[in-house]
Image (cartoon, rainbow, N blue to C red):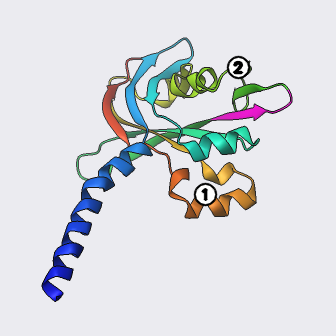
Amino acid sequence: MTRRLFHWLACGLLALLVHLPLVAQANSIDITQARIEAGETGYRLAAGFQFELNRGLEEALARGIPLYFTTEVELSRPRLFWFAERSIFVKQTTRVSYNVLTRQYNASVIGSLQQNYRTLDDALSLVKRPMRWTVADYGELVAGEAYTVAVRMMLDVSQLPKPFQVNAINNRSWRLSSDWKRFSFTADK
């Protein structure tokens, strides 16, 4: 009897372990592109992201709960005999919401751009393919020095209304984030 029970438990655990990576992938953001470019006033981030909203997030959005996507960028300079020097840390948040009365989606970069869209996919295009934004002025980085750039994006549940923050913390479907993508960059100006 115990041997049969052990067999069923082992099969169940194996099925869970096989299924677990699929669940983790469903709530992840992939960084398809990330690079630093020289712009007119400073260094800008050019990035692209790929993800799908799960049904729970789409329903929350349709009920008028805005979703906040935050992109974080960290530039650090490696040092030979000590920890890396964190030079720059900036973030940009994009808010996506739905207006039930006008039946339009709204996507806005907090503090600047705001635009209405007819479909959710169009509104999410501002999140998935954001406009290039300045992450460092020319005077903030040392010309000729190599920097390590780390980029990530996440669904920022800390900006949700308070009653939904509690639900989001305890609900796996509200966890949407990418891993840090790291690459090297040499300041040229």
Q: Residue at x 37, y 26 (%)?
A: 32
Instruction: Check residue 158 in the rendering and tell me which mark sits there, or answer none.
Output: none
Left or right of 79? Residue 123 is: right
Mark 1: amino acid: Ala
In this figure, which residue is indicated by the disc labeled 2? 117
In the picture, which quadrant includes the N terminus? bottom left
Within-10-Å neighbours for mark 2: few <14, some 14–19, many 20+? some
Q: Which residues are magenta?
A: 94-101
In this figure, which residue is indicated by the disc labeled 1? 168
Left or right of 78? Residue 118 is: right
Residue 186 horizontal/vertical position (percent):
33, 24
Residue 123 part of the magenta segment: no
Dividing the picture into quarters, in which one does residue 49 lie?
top left
| SS class, disc 1 | helix
Residue 96 part of the magenta segment: yes
In the rendered image, the residue lying farthest to the right is 101
Left or right of 39? Residue 108 is: right
Residue 12 horizontal/vertical position (percent):
26, 67
Residue 77 horizontal/vertical position (percent):
35, 39
Above or below: residue 36 compared with residue 61: above
Q: Residue at x 51, y 26 (%)?
A: 128
Magenta span: predominant SS is: strand
In the rendered image, the residue lying farthest to the bottom is 1
Distance Cα–Cα, label 1 vs label 2: 26 Å
